[in-house]
Amino acid sequence: MKVIIIEDEKPAARRLSRMLLALDLEVNAMLHSVEESLQWFQVNQHPDLIFLDIQLSDGLSFEIFENIDIKSAIIFTTAYDEYALQAFKLNSIDYLLKPIDEDDLKVAVDKYKQRIPQKETISFDFNDIKNLLINPLEREYKKRFTVKVGQHLKMISIDAIECIYSENKGSYIYTNDGRDYLIDATLEQLENELEPTTFFRVSRKFYININAIKDIISYTNSRLQIKLHSFKDQDIIVSRERVKDFKDWLE
């Protein structure tokens, strides 16, 4: 069986290759860009299985399929949120959310192997999937929080929130009138509930509202510091690994 990896992060590609070797799958090629992939497909026999990242260094990997008719089976390896991944699951063997888990990888490979005897044809509408990334599925996001204030329940509109942060094993919303409120959800639980064009998780500790940003300042170790209009209790730092995604989010 011929297997290739298309992944622009070389350490991630090498790690995936080692994980596949442990499953008795040898990787025949590791490609790191759209251009390199196009050149490779023009002179090589198409593989049986492709492990495909979506965001490559020189564009979306869908550009490869717009130029070359590829019938290989595909397992997506992506960091995209669940709302987009739902569509991938309908059209592909499987998807693996980064960082890739060994058990999830084995399940995906086994799923592919089960299809081999039936010689199933796997078809992809890459335009539909690409459009889904640009125009995510319509879904209902959280519009308000209900918090307890003494013996009362208070409803707080999502538009009134400057940031959401964790502290001492609790999660808090901070509103534009300068008040903190304890909420029952963790930041992880809120990941698919907050509108992604409005809220961004800049670090393990903070979600921020794009409309609350007052200033963005260069910080040490290639990080960024965020100043909000009202919140001044703690420094809000964009972690180095999130800086690129943060800049993309701003645009």
Image (cartoon, grey):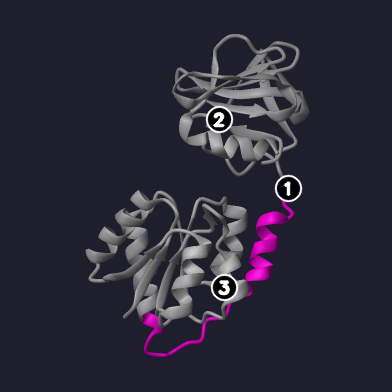
In what element is the residue under mark 1? loop
Quarter of image, res 117: bottom left
In three-dimensional space, the C-alpha distance between marks 2 and 1, rounded to whole angstroms, equals 22 Å
Instruction: Point out which mark residue 202 bears.
Output: 2
The amino acid on which the numbered mark 2 sits, given as a three-letter code, is Val
Residue 110, image x, y percentages: 34, 73
Q: In the rendered structure, which disc, 2 or 1, sits on the residue that comes first in sequence?
A: 1
Residue situated furthest bottom in the rendering: 118
Q: Amino acid at mark 3?
A: Asn
Q: Is residue 127 magenta?
A: yes
**SS category of the residue bearing label 3:** helix
Residue bounds of the magenta highlight: 114-140
Q: Which residue is at 54% across, 14% downward? A: 235
Callout 3: 10 Å neighbours few (<14), some, many (20+)? some
Mark 3, residue position: 91
Q: Nearer the viewer, residue 187 or 208?
A: 208
Please give left or right for residue 63 compared with residue 104 in the image: right
Q: Which class describes the residues within 10 Å of circle 1: few (<14), some (14-19), or many (20+)?
A: few
Q: Is residue 196 left or right of residue 184?
A: right
Q: CA distance from mark 3 to mark 2?
A: 32 Å
**Residue at which label 1 appears:** 140
Where is residue 177? Give x, y as percent. Answer: 75, 12
Position of the C terminus by quadrant: top right
Q: Position of residue 78 (x, y in %)?
A: 49, 55
Viewer-proximal residue, 65 or 207? 65
- Could you say where residue 168 lies in the image, as x and y percent from the top left? 45, 17
Left or right: residue 38 compared with residue 246:
left
